[in-house]
Amino acid sequence: LNGVPGFPLPTVHSQKAYDPQDSFTAKWTRADAMQIKAHSDTSVAAGQNSLPQQLVMPDVPADFPATNPDVWVWDTWTLIDKKANQFSYNGWEVIFCLTADKNAGYGFDDRHTHARIGYFYRRAGVPASRRPANGGWIYGGHLIPEGAQEQVFAGTDYTITAEWSGSMRLLDPTSNKVSLFYTDMAFNRNAAGQDITPSQAVITQSLGQIHADFNHVWFTGFTTHTPLLRPDGVLYQNGAQNPYYNFRDPFTFEDPQHPGVNYMVFEGNTAGQRGTADCTAEDLGYRTNDPHAETVQQVLSTGAYYQKANIGLAVAENSSLSKWKFLPPLISANCVNDQTERPQMYIKDGKYYIFTISHRTTYAAGVDGPDGVYGFVGNGIRSDFQPMNYGSGLMLGNPTDLNEAAGTDYDANPNQNPRAFQSYSHYVMPDGLVESFIDTVEGRRGGALSPTVKVRLRGDASVVDTRYGNNGLGGYGDISANRAAINVVGF
Ligand code: FRU
């Protein structure tokens, strides 16, 4: 890798695989993340995109269609097997989305404490060009019977609960049994919305059945909710250590190198008391004698140690996937970023990619990057992961001017690109197709499915495929199956 004049070199990462049980944690270092700024154009007019065009999601039009008139839609996932193949069921495509009632009197930014997993379906095998502009998803309602997920919090104090992201496994393509892995959330807040005690985040399993006839899709089950993992404060930070801890978004898979073993990746934080100034030279990742290196003291003096994301790993201890054990994190981002969300393991051509979403506003002091997808590649599920693209980690960002302050999705900086928050919560599907939700485009709030885009992967580099769809933008919510499950019992 050649350096950029005026910037440090990225950290050397071998991509070498370790045993999944090993304690080696790869680092997404400051030297790595610094490559994003190194490749950002300082001469663009204010509010343009300063990032390399091939890593940027094309502009989402401001006249995007709503996915549904009654519910906001954000984080979305599909019906997958242990290899992340996406299944249709008896001729229907199905998606699972965090949803919130548009008519309940709270705003889009209050959605998180009202989140319910909803499902949508549409007929499989229809090209995007012959579907309604919004993708044609029919809303099926909530997946979990009202209040059933509160059993996980029995005997604890809480004022409101929510269902946050996860994934859905089709346990066997010849049956209708499905396993939901999601984040069961309980908040204990006063009338002003402040935490009385830290929120509880519990990675939870619930089993159900999918059904379909010629007219619709529906689900039964999801009445029993089994808590799988609570952060232990040893490998993964908990609420006692940091009321702002992140612990959520389970994604399960099998590793072809370890047949029959099920693993889970999830969003976590490095364990320890919030505010402990302990980032190390390894977290910074500079090469010996790099003239542009920061010292540990310099970094710690900025407060960058408040941001300590990690990508967690757990292993299933039984075949029904109802007992899991923590393993050490796969990647940490100490003094780099506080959130590595909705991680997924994507195995292609013998390479193991971890994709995760992150925000500009969760970066530590002195490092910067856009909202979007970050990627890391190695030779096994636990590796010395190489951050994608110039060693930076950035894979698919929103159009952003890194020379201007971020602003927020609800309160834009007028000098920022009006699409810096156009999309979020991307999920990479088979063939490099990427779905996400629309947050804010030119001040218009979304809560709708984004146009699907396509990323082409070549080793540790990627590009947005501008030959896909309309100059790179596919259909809104074009989330298609690449496999079909046919269950004769269901007919
Ligand atoms: C990503 C995310 C997830 C979480 C959900 C809550 O958009 O932060 O990590 O499960 O949103 O709404």
Image (spheres, helix red, strand yellow):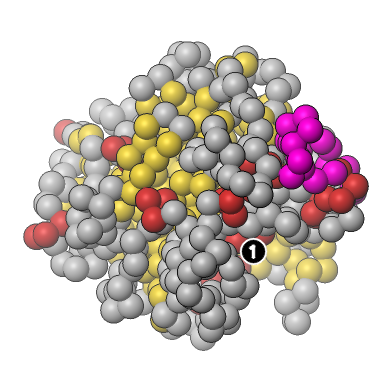
Q: What stretch is highlighted in magenta?
A: 276-295
Instruction: Report whether 324 appears left or right of 132.
Output: right
Quarter of the figure with residue 197: bottom right
Closer to the camera in the image, 52 or 133: 52
In the figure, is residue 106 to the left or right of 151? left
Position of residue 327 measured from the top left corner of the image (x, y, whole percent): 68, 26
Closer to us: 478 or 52: 52
Residue 283 on the magenta segment: yes
According to the image, label 1 marks what residue? 361
| Quadrant assignment for the N terminus | top right
Residue type beneath disc 1: Thr
- At 53% from the left and 57% from the top, the residue drawn is 40
Q: Where is residue 368 in the image (x, y as percent from the top left)?
A: 63, 57
Q: Nearer the viewer, residue 188 or 479?
A: 479
| Secondary element at image label 1 | helix
Locate residue 344, reporting x and y percent: 49, 39
Residue located at (71% from left, 23% from top) = 24
Direction from residue 39 to residue 236 in the image, left or right: right
- The structure residue drawn at horizontal position 74% and vertical position 36%, both measured from the top left corner, is 290
- Residue at the limit of the structure toward the front, as seen here: 5
One can see residue 453 in this view: yes
In the picture, residue 445 is in which quadrant?
A: bottom left
- Residue 238 visible within the image: no
Above or below, 81 against 398 in this view is: above
Residue 255: % across, % down: 47, 21
Quadrant into which the C terminus falls:
top left
Main SS, magenta residues: loop
Mark 1 burial class by Cα count in 10 Å: few <14, some 14-19, many 20+ = some
Q: Residue drawn 75% across and 66% down?
A: 188
Whether the magenta-drawn stretch holds residue 385 is answered as no
